[in-house]
Structures are given as structure tokens and as C-alpha cells.
């Protein structure tokens, strides 16, 4: 039985919404509300993470593309593939 449990695939940290939240708190919360139920936005012109997650066109692929490219309104930060995956997992968990 223990051998069978050891062979089960485990979720990687890259797919862990909690790890993505930690990254969001570090990189994103100065401009975005990252909470599920925000009291208000730091910048009214910037969408909350929940608003982004609820947008019908939002998908893992669209978020990854967006986080992989430069942004005129966002700081130019470089995220690794795993960090992008974590942020995407967190954003999609807010649906």
C-alpha cells in the first residue's frame, strides 16, 4: 500500500495557488487587489485579480502569455516559468 501511495503523482509547487499568492503579495499587490473579497482597489484603473480571473477570455495560456511579455503599465519584472505557473494557478483559483 505504501508503495502505491509513493507512486501517485503529487502536485508540483508550480501548480500551487498558495505559492502563487505569496508571489502576488510580493510583486503585484502594490497595484492590484489580490484578495478574493477586496475592500477596494489600490488603483481604480487597475483590475483586481478576481476581476481578471472572472474575465471569460482568461485562461492559463492567456495569463502565461501576458506574464511572459513586457507591459507598458506594469513594472518590467522577469518571472521564471515556475513563478508564472504559480501566479496563474493563484489567479485561476479566484474564479
Image: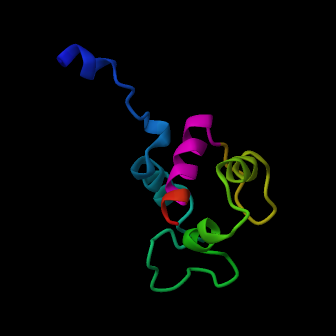
Q: How many marks?
A: 0
Q: Residue at x 43, y 37 (%)?
A: 13
Q: Residue at x 61, y 74 (%)?
A: 51
Question: Most prominent secondary structure in the magenta stretch?
Answer: helix
Return the x and y of residue 68 as percentages of the image width and height: 73, 45
Q: Which range is magenta?
A: 79-91
Which image quarter is the N terminus in?
Answer: top left
Q: Residue at x 44, y 78 (%)?
A: 37
What's the image's color scheme?
rainbow
Q: Nearer the viewer, residue 40 or 57?
A: 57
Is residue 11 rendered to the left or right of residue 91?
Answer: left
45 over 24 or under it: above or below = below
Is residue 64 rendered to the left or right of residue 17?
Answer: right
Q: Nearer the viewer, residue 72 or 81?
A: 81
Q: Is residue 51 magenta?
A: no
Q: Is residue 80 magenta?
A: yes
Q: Nearer the viewer, residue 5 or 23?
A: 5
Q: Residue at x 45, y 85 (%)?
A: 39
Is residue 2 rendered to the left or right of residue 74?
Answer: left
29 over 60 or under it: above or below = below
Return the x and y of residue 23 as percentages of the image width and height: 49, 51
Return the x and y of residue 79 as percentages of the image width and height: 63, 42
Return the x and y of residue 15 as percentages of the image width and height: 48, 41
User: Which residue is farthest left?
Assistant: 1
Is residue 11 rendered to the left or right of residue 33?
Answer: left
Amino acid at each position: 500500500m505504501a508503495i502505491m501511495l509513493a507512486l501517485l503523482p503529487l502536485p508540483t509547487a508550480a501548480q500551487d495557488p498558495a505559492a502563487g499568492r505569496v508571489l502576488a503579495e510580493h510583486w503585484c499587490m502594490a497595484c492590484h487587489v489580490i484578495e478574493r473579497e477586496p475592500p477596494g482597489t489600490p488603483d481604480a484603473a487597475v483590475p483586481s485579480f478576481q476581476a481578471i480571473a472572472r474575465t471569460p477570455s482568461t485562461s492559463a495560456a492567456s495569463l502565461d502569455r501576458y506574464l511572459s511579455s513586457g507591459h507598458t503599465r506594469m513594472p518590467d519584472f522577469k518571472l521564471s516559468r515556475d513563478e508564472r505557473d504559480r501566479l496563474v494557478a493563484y489567479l485561476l483559483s479566484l474564479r
